[in-house]
Image (cartoon, grey):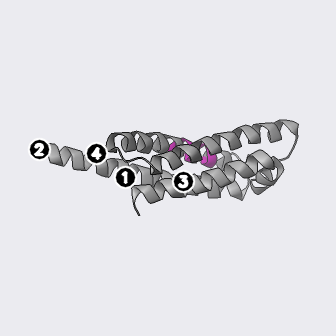
Amino acid sequence: MTVKMLFVATAVISLANGIVTLVSPATQLSLYGVALNAGTAHMAQWAGLGSVVVGLLAWFGSRNEAPEVERVFLGILLIYHVAAAALSTLGAFRHLVGGGGWLLGVMTGSFAIAYAFFLNRDIWSRWRGAT
């Protein structure tokens, strides 16, 4: 896998998730076993908007050619996926969400590992080149 492929995979998954959540929050909430009411639907749409932003960020990251900018995109998306994995796993542990919460925690955790790998590889190669 390349960095560009990771960005594209993130973009496709985040944009699809975000658009579904914006258009049909009930569908998305049912995947996680969350009861639907006006407040949860509204907050799900806010989360969907966040997913769209992450997807756009990843898409523009995949189109970038500057190594310095790529590192910034890697760092931002690493922080996002670490936080998302922690929130999803915590929600699953606290029984706030069903099995979908565990799945989301595993998926975002996997993305976090991939982003950490590419960011660390970049930092390591820069450090080795400086010595």
The amino acid marked with disc number 4 is Ile
Tell me which numbered mark, 1 or 2, is placed earlier along the sequence.
1
Binning the other alpha carbons within 10 Å of mark 2 as few (below 14), some (14 to 19) or many (20 upward) gives few
Amino acid type of the residue tagged 1 in the rendering: Phe
Find out whether residue 102 is within the magenta segment: no
**Does label 4 or label 3 sit earlier along the sequence?**
3
Count up the numbered dots.
4
**Residue that badge 3 annotates:** 10
- Please state which of residues 46 and 82 is positioned toward the viewer in this rendering: 46
How far apart marks 1 and 2 lie (CA) works out to 20 Å
Question: What's the amino acid at mark 2?
Answer: Thr
Point out which mark residue 41 bears: none
Which residue is pictured at 70% across the width and 58% down the height?
A: 99
**Secondary structure at numbered mark 2:** loop
What x and y, as percent, mark residue 105? 59, 52
Tell me: residue 56, above or below residue 111.
above
* Location of mark 1 (residue): 118
Q: Which residues are magenta?
A: 82-89
Q: CA distance from mark 1 to mark 3?
A: 14 Å
Q: Nearer the viewer, mark 1 or mark 3?
A: 3
Residue toward you, 21 or 117: 21
Q: Report how far apart the C-alphas of labels 1 and 4 lie in the structure.
A: 9 Å
- Quadrant of the frame with the N terminus: bottom left
- Residue at horizontal 75 percent and vertical 42 percent from the top: 44
Numbered mark located on residue 123 in the image = 4
Q: Nearer the viewer, residue 18 or 59?
A: 59
